[in-house]
Each structure stands twice: as structure tokens, then as C-alpha cells.
Image (cartoon, rainbow, N blue to C red):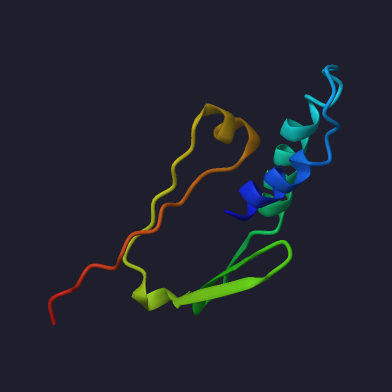
Amino acid sequence: MVAAVAVAGAASLVPASSSSSGAPLLPALWLGWRYLYWANKVYMVTNNRVLKLEGVFTKSHSDAALDKINDMTLEQDLLGRLLGYGTSPSRPPTRRPA
């Protein structure tokens, strides 16, 4: 949502002319925003907790105790494997029988 607002707000900076010199500006702004968002997301794993810190202008923090995490998955496409990134989708915890 914030990326769409930033890109939409930047669209008014492009002069309304018939030349295509401003055409690369929107993809460059979008890629720059995505990079900033990606670069400001950090996962920290300690011996007790997993912490996620993220945000460019507004910081957000969430954590979970290691004993509350049942399992984790990592999804990587070919480019993610080559460049060393992936997605870890979050799932709600499952109930264990007592």
C-alpha cells in the first residue's frame, strides 16, 4: 500500500510531455522502493526467540518464542537460489494435543 502511494505520488513529478524521457522514472522509483523495503527487513534468531524487524520510515517489530514455532518453510525460485534470498510464508500455529 505504501509503495503504491509512493509511486503514485512520484507520478506527478514526471512532466506531461510527449517525450519518453520520464518513462524509466516510475520503474526506477518502484525498484528503489522495493530495494529499500527489502534492505530494511531483518530476521534475528537467538537461542530463545525469533525477531522480525522491518520498515523504512516506520519501524515494526514482532517476535516469537522458539518453543512456540512448530515448523518453517522456505520457498526459493531459481533467481532466489542464485542470489541467496527466498520467502518464508507464515502459517498459523497448529494445536498440539496436551
Residue 66 appears at what percent x and percent y?
A: 43, 74
12 or 92: nearer the viewer: 12
Q: Quadrant of the C terminus?
A: bottom left
Q: Residue at 50% across / 79% down in the picture?
A: 48
Q: Is residue 77 left or right of residue 40?
A: left
77 or 32: nearer the viewer: 32
Q: Residue at 84% across / 41% down in the picture?
A: 13
Q: Is residue 34 above or below residue 90?
A: above
48 or 78: nearer the viewer: 78
Residue 87 appears at what percent x and percent y?
A: 49, 47
- Asked where in the image residue 7 lies, by quadrant, the reply is top right
34 or 67: nearer the viewer: 34
Residue lying furthest top? 19
Q: Is residue 42 above or below residue 26?
A: below
Q: Is residue 17 above or below residue 49?
A: above
Q: Is residue 45 left or right of residue 31?
A: left
Residue lying furthest left? 97
Residue 6 appears at what percent x and percent y?
A: 71, 50
Q: How many marks?
A: 0
Residue 43 appears at what percent x and percent y?
A: 59, 63
Q: Is residue 86 left or right of residue 16?
A: left
Q: Is residue 71 left or right of residue 14?
A: left
Q: Residue at 67% across / 71% down in the picture?
A: 59
